[in-house]
Image (spheres, rainbow, N blue to C red):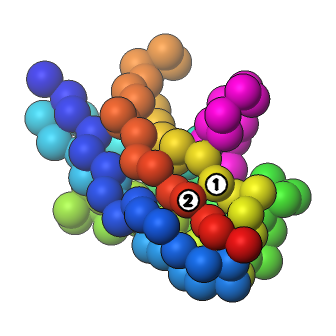
Amino acid sequence: QVQLVESGGGLVQAGGSLRLSCAVSGSSFSINAMRWYRQAPGKQREWVALINKGGATDYADSVKGRFTISRDNAKNTVYLQMNSLKPEDTAVYYCWILRGAPGDIYWGQGTQVTVSS
């Protein structure tokens, strides 16, 4: 059974940094794309960042230049380094993976990030 376990969330002051991790277990298939999403209270879930198997990355405009996504394929882990955090970054952050086939996707349980002003 594929499981995604996120960690690294917490409370931080504006301008601070956090590093999220998402460890994938139970997958004998290689992972293609890995993404981070977030959902703030009362808002829809939104995409934050992605990294494909080859290491190419892309970011939402709202986090570009402040967040960095990376992955360790040997550990089946994806990271999100978040710098210069703002109160509007407050949300539950979810990791997402796509394995070999379209629709073969999995979500993590989410980790809370709270940025105080």
Is label 2 in a helix, a strand or a loop?
strand
* View extreme (top): residue: 103
Instruction: Left or right? Give the position of 6 relative to 3.
Output: right
Q: Amino acid at mark 1?
A: Thr
Q: Amino acid at mark 2?
A: Thr
**Which residues are the magenta region?**
38-48
Residue 90 picture location, percent across and down = 64, 54
Which residue sits at x=46%, y=50%?
112
Rounded to the nearest angstrom, the CA distance separating label 1 from label 2 is 5 Å
Quadrant housing residue 101: top left
* View extreme (right): residue: 61
Please name whichever residue, 110 or 3, is drawn nearer the observer in this view of the structure.
110
| Vertical placement of residue 93 versus 103, above or below | below
Which residue sits at x=80%, y=68%?
64
Instruction: Left or right? Give the position of 95 relative to 117.
Output: left
Q: Is residue 76 visible?
A: yes
Residue on which the image places disc 2: 114
**Quadrant in which the N terminus appears:** top left
Q: Which mark is residue 90?
A: 1
Which residue sits at x=44%, y=72%?
19
Cβ atoms at labels 1 and 2 below 8 Å apart: yes
Is residue 21 part of the magenta span, yes or no? no
Please name whichever residue, 110 or 80, is drawn nearer the observer in this view of the structure.
110
Query: What crowding class fits label 1: few (fewer than 14 Cα within 10 Å), some (14-19), or many (20 or more)?
Result: many
**Mark 1 or mark 2: whose residue is earlier in sequence:** 1
| Vertical placement of residue 6 versus 27, above or below | below
